Image (spheres, helix red, strand yellow):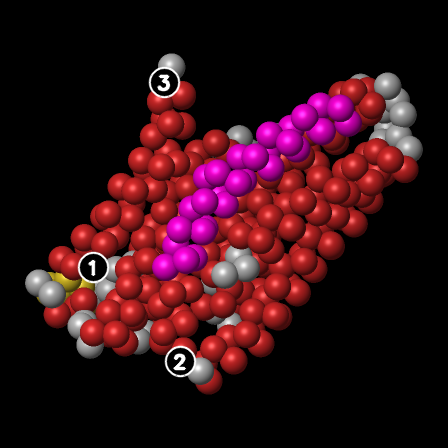
Amino acid sequence: MIPTLIISLREFLEAFLIIGVFLGISKKLRLKREKEILLASLTGIIISLTLPTIVFSLGDKAHIIFSENNAELLEGYLMIFSGFFIAYVVFSLHNFFVFKRSKAIISAHQKLQKNVFDLSLFLTIVFFIIREGFEIALFTATTSLFSRFVENMAGLIIGFTISAIVGVATFFAYTKFPVAKIFKITEYMIILLGAAFVKNGLGELMEVYFDIHLSTILPFKLAFLPEKSTFIGHMVNSFVGLEQNFSLAKLAIMGVYIVSIYLIFLRKKVSLSHS
């Protein structure tokens, strides 16, 4: 649920910011196109919620098949893949989508400012919103396999709701939310999620192939954390990768992952921001 919540929060927040831009232009220039923009946005939102729902449904069926045939082995490989895939799509592929979308939005803005609102512009706005739903479906395609359909839907709805509240409040200027900081926080969350996936995946494979339990390699206990078997403990482990029975081996795996993601994806971004 946690990966779905974080990703849907990021993507739907972008969708609501796009809607806010169009509404802001229409209101500022007194074009009176708010109804058309809201109708197009609602259409896009419905489709955007439908796309990941279909993916979650397919993932739930696949989860049943995996659980019948070498579940631990498949889960181990998929977790490792998901750990790196989620970082790639968020820090690399997502930037490509944003760049392409930004150029299209500028063109649409120019058309809107000419006081022309035809079917093509309506479909353009719908497409902008649908793209966010497509990205959610793409980014959660593998991570959704580790949660049930209900859990994935809960994450999707919670992420959508939080994004809607932030987007609407920001548009009406009742509250000034630091949107850039929200995106930065979700980046850190995604890195921790990826580290937890890789750590758990390697742990599964080590147990299956070599009967080696990472928890037994230089172990130490995090007494302040709830047991992994409890709901809260499972959520903590899924989010930050920590559990009561921890070890230096697990910590080392997570550390290597975090450093690798920083060197591959984030170091260049940090350098550019300071230049």
Extreme residue in the bottom direction: 68
Q: Label 3 sits on what residue type?
A: His
Residue 269 or residue 212, whichever sits in front = 212
Three-letter code, disc 1: Lys
Residue 182 visible to the viewer: no
Judge depth for marks 3 and 2 and give the one in front.
Answer: 2
Front-most of residues 31 and 40:
40
Is residue 53 or residue 151 the one in the foreground?
A: 53
Specify the principal SS of the magenta part.
helix
Question: On the picture, is 147 further left or further right than 161?
Answer: left
Q: Amino acid at mark 2?
A: Asn
Q: Tag 1's secondary structure? A: helix
| Placement of 239 over or under 190, stated as above or below | below
- Answer above or below: position of 165 versus 156: above
Judged from the image, the secondary structure of the residue bearing numbered disc 3 is helix
Residue 177 on image: x %, y %: 51, 34
Neighbours of disc 3 within 10 Å: few (<14), some (14-19), many (20+)? few
* Circle 2 SS class: loop
Judging by the rendered image, the residue that carries numbered circle 3 is 274
Q: Which residue is drawn at the image coordinates 60% and 37% (left, top)?
A: 97
Find the magenta span and give its range.
80-108
Residue designated by label 1:
250
In the figure, is residue 233 to the left or right of 146? left
Q: Return the mark for residue 70.
A: 2
Q: Which residue is drawn at the image coordinates 60% and 30% (left, top)?
A: 99
Q: Position of residue 152 (x, y in %)?
A: 53, 65
Nearer-N-terminus badge (3/2): 2
